[in-house]
Amino acid sequence: MSTERRVPWIIKYRPKRIEEVVNQEEAKMKFVSWLRKWPNVQKRAALLYGPPGCGKTSLVEAAANEFGYELIEMNASDFRRKTDIERIAKRAATTSSLFGSAKKIILLDEVDGISGREDSGGLEAILQLIKISPSPIVMTANDPWDQSLKPLRDASEMIKFDRLKKQDVVRVLRRICEAEGLMCEEEALEYIAERSEGDLRSAINDLQAVGEGYGKVTLSLVKALVRPRDREHDPFETLKNLFSAKYAWQAKMALSQSQLDYDQLRLWLLDNIALQYTDPEDRARAYEALSRADIYMGRIIKTGDWDLLAYAIDMMTAGVAMAAKNNPKDKYRWVKYTFPQRLTLLARTKEVRAIRDDLARILASHLHISTSLAKSEIIPLLHVVFMTNPEYAAKLAVGLGLSEKMIEFLAGPEKTTVLKYYREFKEAIQRQALQQAISTQQVAKPEKEKPKPSTKTSKKVKSETKSSLLSYLKK
Ligand SMILES: Nc1ncnc2c1ncn2[C@@H]1O[C@H](COP(=O)(O)OP(=O)(O)OP(=O)(O)O)[C@@H](O)[C@H]1O
Ligand SMILES: [Mg+2]
């Protein structure tokens, strides 16, 4: 158990002191002076904003640690209801806590997640909290410029974080290599840094994947392994990497470096688990994990809640890889994997009518109409959308869980363009979900535990698909 669970380096090397947060000097100064003056400040809240993985949350944690604050952390999705806010405020108001510190910081992470939300209740509640809170409120956001967040901006000290430069990223990576006693080539670190586009979280994850897997970080290894942005591995390699993963994050990495997306991976696993694992209980565990992933996927398509994708991915990667308990040697067996039956069948026998029927069923259940109405009214309309607005069409297709065959059917001559967007789009949400899955290292949680949702891209998909399909159709 304990050997299977390694600490992710993004947690191990999280800055503990303010000086360890690199290259955000202006933000650090502004934030620290605001915090020290509190409550004698103009704005009772601070809003830290900037690109992902540049140190916003890290700075708050480091400052709390250094100045002896207790940090009360909340995710945007937690403060939907007013009662929650009142509960937090109460907790913040109690003067002493069990573990010592009376000083508290309330951290509301990723508040831009609430901008698209239908109910403005959450926003009002935060504004209220800012007014009455006996402790400083600190918020973070990637993009605080949404119209609906204006009241929040007005109430906050705005603190800007810059995208980290390549050299900053390299410096942090080098320090980690030294601490881990890892041999590393300078060009390898530069390669990783280049690819991270200033996102230190993803850079550190890449470094760990190579460093822990191979014990050294060379340019050739990195070139071969770090390819999350243009994915390379073919299905057979992906399966091999996934099954042989010793740690959960390695299994997730197998997907992130694969040509397959999450939908395709499910199909490949369906046929190949039984080939890789020989023990009946191991097999059962693996199929159980896969079927949980299916349940999550079904729920995502039904509700548009893409936050769940990280959990679905968790099940189908880590869940499957960790299933070989009775016969762990099976993990490394050489297996001649088979091409998914369902894909071959679909490719060969599905004709247009069957595709249209499937499509009509999906639309009917989404829009609560009959399949014949979907066929006579909606599909013709979608034809137009798919042929005139490929990017938007691709978003709809992802949100509705349409297959590539359905897209080809709808887009006709535009199919290459729509499919290009469709794959790009899937890749983006998948990358984000993986990042989330890797950075939180949640392994195969039981169904009933409520997953903690993420925000950003997934939220965008959510609001842009279902609701916009409806509004499009109402025109
Ligand atoms: N400026 C930095 N200095 C040192 N380490 C950093 C810095 N920025 C990021 N990191 C590392 O990357 C990880 C992620 O950073 P952090 O959580 O602070 O990002 P963030 O800016 O809050 O991003 P997001 O908007 O995605 O929440 C941290 O655990 C830390 O190890
Ligand atoms: Mg953060």
Image: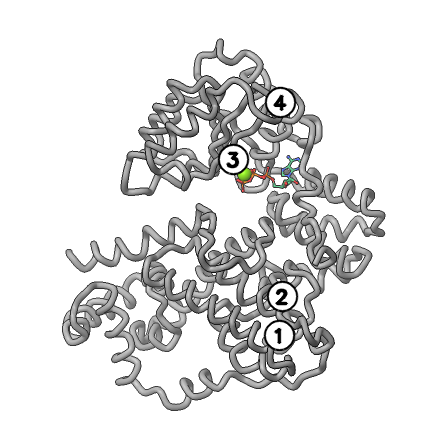
Residue 100, label in figure? 4
| Residue with the mark numbered 2 | 254
Mark 4 vs 3, N-terminal side: 3
For the residues carrying marks 4 and 1, which lies nearer the camera in this image? Answer: 4
Say which residue appears at 65% left-offset and 26% top-offset. 65
- Name the residue carrying label 1: 239
Q: Which residue lies at the image location 24% right of the left edge and 74% below the top edge? A: 360
Above or below for 182 versus 225: above
Q: Position of residue 473 (x, y in %)?
A: 18, 60
Label 4 residue SS: loop
Disc 2 and disc 3: Cα gap in Å? 29 Å
Q: Is residue 109 left or right of residue 67?
A: left
Asked whether 138 or 54 is in front, the reply is 138
Judge: label 1 CB < 8 Å from ligand 1.
no
Query: According to the image, label 3 marks what residue?
Result: 50
Gap between marks 1 and 2 measured at Cα: 8 Å
**In the image, 397: left or right of 340?**
left
Q: Are marks 1 and 3 in contact (CB under 8 Å)?
A: no
How far apart in space, not on screen, are marks 1 and 3 (Cα)?
37 Å
Q: Is residue 178 above or below residue 104?
A: below
Q: Which residue is located at x 47 percent, y 71 percent?
A: 291
In which quadrant of the rendered image does the N terminus lie?
Answer: bottom right
Q: Position of residue 244 (x, y in %)?
A: 69, 71
Which amino acid type is marked by label 3? Gly
Q: What secondary structure is found at the residue carrying circle 3?
A: loop
Q: Amino acid at mark 2?
A: Ala
Asked if ligand 1 lies within 8 A of label 4, the reply is no
Q: Is mark 2 within 8 Å of ligand 1?
A: no
Image location (x, y in percent) of residue 295: 42, 66
Earlier in the chain: of badge 4 and badge 2, it is 4
